[in-house]
Image (cartoon, rainbow, N blue to C red):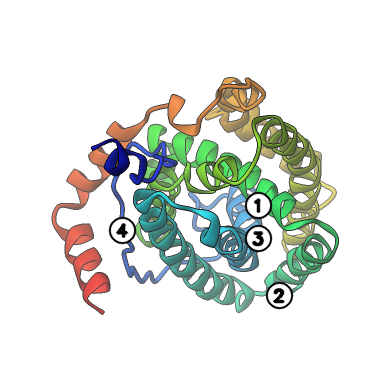
Amino acid sequence: MDTALNDTPALQSGSKLDFKVRNRQFASGEDRHWYGGDPVITAHYNALSSMFPDGERFFCDSVRAQKDKITDPKLLKEISAFVGQEAVHSREHKLYNERIQAQGYPMDKLEGLTEFGLKIARRRLPLKWQLGQTCALEHFTAMLANQLLRDTDMAEKAKPEDYELWMWHAVEETEHKAVAFDTLKAVSSPVGFYINRVRAILMTTLFFNIGLVVNMWLLLRADGLQWSPRAWGRWVWYMFGKPGHIRKSLGEYLDWFRPGFHPWDHDNRELVERWKIAQGEKLDAEGDAAAAA
């Protein structure tokens, strides 16, 4: 009996949700200013989307590089679902970016900037540090997802196709928000794990926000707004005022520095369930079809 217990793999997953791959397809990015006719907030989301195709591939690679060290069957299953979800995100945002590019925006240039930065990370950072960057970036996307799922601003202003894309992405980022974190924790010493994730969040805070501002500038330039104080003020208000994504996420951001932090300390499963109910059987049917394929 004791031998059987000792042979049981240690639980390495801290996830509170079961999740799967949904092979969704979207006709998003067809309208030039799809966010309520607002070129500034549309540019904000386009700037984010430009980072996703290569960024999601980097996430997948960094997690897969540590997969052979994982012994928990639950976490191994979650890694497979994580990689599948991120692969579909990468594909759909690439298609979205191509539609935005066709409207005269330099999405290819923005994607190139992300690709260049990630090439440096792949060459210069140890594999565990690359996974640390993934953890930190996943924390950023989880915070954004939480705000998108809680606020009504996008539902009220975005075109339906674009709203569907961003809400689907937000749901899946919430579902798998702990996978990279749990993987890094499982392959690291407690002290090394903490140092790595603090280092990673500081680097991410700096370089992600620099990249976002550069991307915004290039997108606003296509509309002749790159030097407009009113345009930049509108963006700052959106981030810190109403709906205030950064302001509302500050507590969750700072929690990252707490030694015992886990992404599911911020338990927002009800937001995922609410979205699934709103979608009816659509998500489950598409998830089952993807699994069968």
* Label 3 sits on residue: 51
Residue 73 vertical placement versus 113 (above, below): above
Quarter of the image for residue 201 reads top right
Question: Picture coordinates of residue 140 (x, y %)?
Answer: 60, 41
Whichever of callouts 1 and 4 sits on the residue coming sooner in the sequence is 4
> Alpha-carbon distance for marks 1 and 2?
26 Å
Is residue 159 visible in the rendered image? The answer is: no
> Alpha-carbon distance for marks 4 and 2?
30 Å
> Alpha-carbon distance for marks 1 and 4?
22 Å
Disc 3 marks a residue whose amino acid type is Met
Disc 2 marks a residue whose amino acid type is Asp
In front: label 1 or label 4: 1
In front: label 2 or label 3: 3
Q: Nearer the viewer, residue 182 or 215?
A: 182
* Label 4 sits on residue: 20
Quarter of the image for residue 11 reads top left
- The residue that appears at 35% across and 46% down in the rendered structure is 7
Disc 1 marks a residue whose amino acid type is Leu
